Image (cartoon, rainbow, N blue to C red):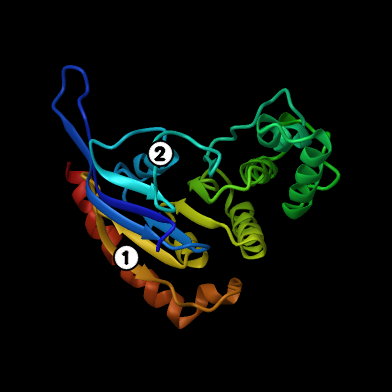
Amino acid sequence: MSLLALDHITVRFQPKGKPEVTALDDVSLRVAHDTFAVIVGPSGCGKSTLLRLVAGLETPTSGSMTLDGQPIAGPSADRGMVFQSYTLFPWLSVRENVMFGPKLKGLAKAECEDIADDLIRAVGLSGFERSFPKELSGGMRQRVALARALANDPRILLMDEPFGALDSQTRQLMQELLLEVWQARRKTVLFITHDIDEAIILGDSVHVMTARPGRIKRSMSIDIPRPRNLDALTSTEFMQFKREILHLMHDEAVLAART
């Protein structure tokens, strides 16, 4: 059984004084345990709306969503979220930010500290435990955000274009770090991006969405062997996947531009 199951999800909005908008239309999706699923699609296709539904931050107009067979009905610690913006508490240190979730769960201080220190090491921030977010670079802040999301030991990690605001070199380093952490801890990940290279290098599966209203146009398994390094970016297999997704995305981007 899949860990995450979305069945016939439709989302409609009614902006005040404007016509009804269908953001998602009859979306069905399966994400297996311990896999890395990536969703790509043109701007405005409903990618982030879909992720917010899984996070429990929004509710569908129709359809059903389950995590490990249980209905999704609101936010929960079993779903960790990492946004593109740096959603850290500026008044807390790196260590205190990572400890925040475990403290809310009522864990003992020593256990919270052990969890935080382990994750800070895992994301390569040892020595910055007492630093505050304003003292860190963008990439370092996202490392803290990743560690904080993992601190609650979620069943699934939800990532909404987390590297979109980073420069290309930092983005590549963050992709490598994320894969290292994922392979070591084997979390299920649902990742949103508009970057095709990123989708292929990270994903076990890539799901291409249509222009609004968002639907799943094509789902494909990325069978490039892991671990994936820089050489994978120039492999024949990688270029074949990239060419196919580029064509799918181009067709949808043209449609999106006309709406």
Three-letter code for the amino acid on which mark 1 is drawn: Ser
Number of numbered discs on residues? 2
Identify the element where label 2 is drawn: helix
Q: State whether residue 20 is above or below residue 128.
A: above
On the image, the x and y values in percent for residue 93 come to 77, 31
On the image, the x and y values in percent for residue 166 come to 58, 46
Q: Circle 2 sits on which residue? A: 52
Please state if 15 lies on the left or on the right of 178 as rendered: left
For the view shown, which residue lies furthest in the top direction?
17
For the view shown, which residue lies furthest in the front direction?
70
Identify the element where label 1 is drawn: strand
For the view shown, which residue lies furthest in the left direction?
19
Q: State whether residue 132 is above or below residue 232.
A: above
On the image, the x and y values in percent for residue 229 come to 61, 72
Please state if 97 lies on the left or on the right of 158 as rendered: right
Q: Would you identify the image quadrant in which residue 96 lies?
A: top right
Question: As rendered, which of 140 and 14 lies closer to the eye?
Answer: 14
Q: Which of disc 2 and disc 1 is earlier in sequence?
A: 2
For the view shown, which residue lies furthest in the bottom direction?
236
Q: Circle 1 sits on which residue? A: 219
Q: Residues within 10 Å of mark 2 (few under 14, many from 20)?
A: some
On the image, the x and y values in percent for residue 257 come to 22, 45
Per the model, the C-alpha gap separating discs 1 and 2 is 20 Å
